[in-house]
Image: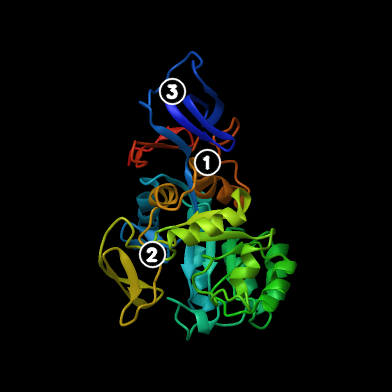
Amino acid sequence: MTNGRVVTPDGVLENGWVSVRDGRIAAVGQGVAPDGPTTDVGGGTIVPGFVDIHCHGGGGDAFTSSDPVKIRKAASAHRKHGTTTMLASLVSRPVPELADQVSALAELVQEGVVAGIHLEGPFLSAARCGAHDPAILCPPEQTAVTKLLDAGKGTVRMITVAPELEGAVQAVRQLVDNNVLAAIGHTDATEAQVRPAVDAGATVATHLFNGMRPLHHREPGPIGALLDDERVTVELICDLVHLHPTAVRLAAHHAGLKRTVLITDAIAAAGVGDGVYDVGGLEVRVVDGVPTLAGGASLAGSTLTMDMAFRNAVNSCGLSLVEAAYATSTRGAELLGLDTGKLQPGCAADIVVLDAELKPRDVMSKGEWVKE
């Protein structure tokens, strides 16, 4: 593809081009493109396909479904918005039920519909449960963690844990030993309770600021501990509802490129609209695009898509195109150890062409234009 503004990790190439061969990026350059078939993108902005490591559903369906058609539909809804790689996130349920959901999703991971599974619970703090049923939450006991990992057969890529729970530090070590990302979230921990979990190998902050004890100048809590630790990548829900633009900018600039990842935390309502939805057995009402628990004010995920997160980051939060691309694509791919998320030779040809308003015009997945 030629005649584009190509966003690479090293900068933006005006009048740039990207050469694709056999499903991979063969070359990236500026000026005159190599000979061969080309697609003129008409001055559009070319970015790597978005990588969402925290998403519960979309298009009217959730990843908790046992119906593979509905799971594919949810993934497809986000692919239209440029998300070429995603983890399927599950909310808290009793461990046996959650293991069944993991087992059903594992087959879709093996098919390549999603890149893996993220368990956001049930090992969370009841004091910061958000849209998780507090009656279901439990400590991360070793046999429970093992049951969930076994159900996934290697497809579980991340699990969120509240570090103050009994057995949490041991659980973090167990996850790391099984090549699973240990994330810290939905926690009422003090800074002193967070540190041992990070020392044990926790490397992700689940939607920083949200579902956490607030930052205080005399007790930094999890926000201060996680944001300031060079070993931790921080998730940010960039829908401008969960976080004020200033909070996004402060966190992203403090953490830097290598430690900032934008996520959607989207529920089934993403790409559909307002209405009543079920999230982990709890009733959620979406009004003006904002999901909250019925009868309360607690936010219950989002209706965000990754292209909107990208636009918000650039237009409202003051991030550069390079910073936004790294946070919506590159860092997530790095965390998962995948060869995508960058417009560099050798990477998978997962590409999004954005128009002048930074809205997706065309989406390429593994070298093929998405037609759905």
Where does the C terminus fall, quadrant-wise? top left
Q: Residues within 10 Å of mark 3 (few under 14, many from 20)?
A: many
Could you tell me the amino acid type at mark 1? Answer: Val
Residue linked to disc 1: 322
Numbered label attached to residue 2? 3
Q: Residue, x 69% and y 59% (percent of image)?
A: 231
Q: Residues within 10 Å of mark 1 (few under 14, many from 20)?
A: some
Q: Position of residue 281 (x, y in %)?
A: 38, 77
Q: Quadrant of residue 62?
A: bottom left
Residue linked to disc 2: 241
Labels 3 and 2: the sequence-earlier one: 3
Q: Quadrant of residue 174?
A: bottom right
Could you tell me the amino acid type at mark 2? Answer: Val
| Contact check, label 1 and label 3, Cβ < 8 Å | no
Q: Position of residue 223 (x, y in %)?
A: 59, 70
Q: Residue, x 34% and y 58% (percent of image)?
A: 270
Tag nearer the camera, 3 or 2: 2
Q: Position of residue 188 (x, y in %)?
A: 57, 80
Q: Residue, x 62% and y 63% (percent of image)?
A: 227
Is residue 273 in view?
Answer: yes
Q: Residues within 10 Å of mark 2 (few under 14, many from 20)?
A: few
175 with respect to 261 (left or right): right
| Contact check, label 2 and label 1, Cβ < 8 Å | no
| Contact check, label 3 and label 2, Cβ < 8 Å | no
Is residue 88 in view?
Answer: no
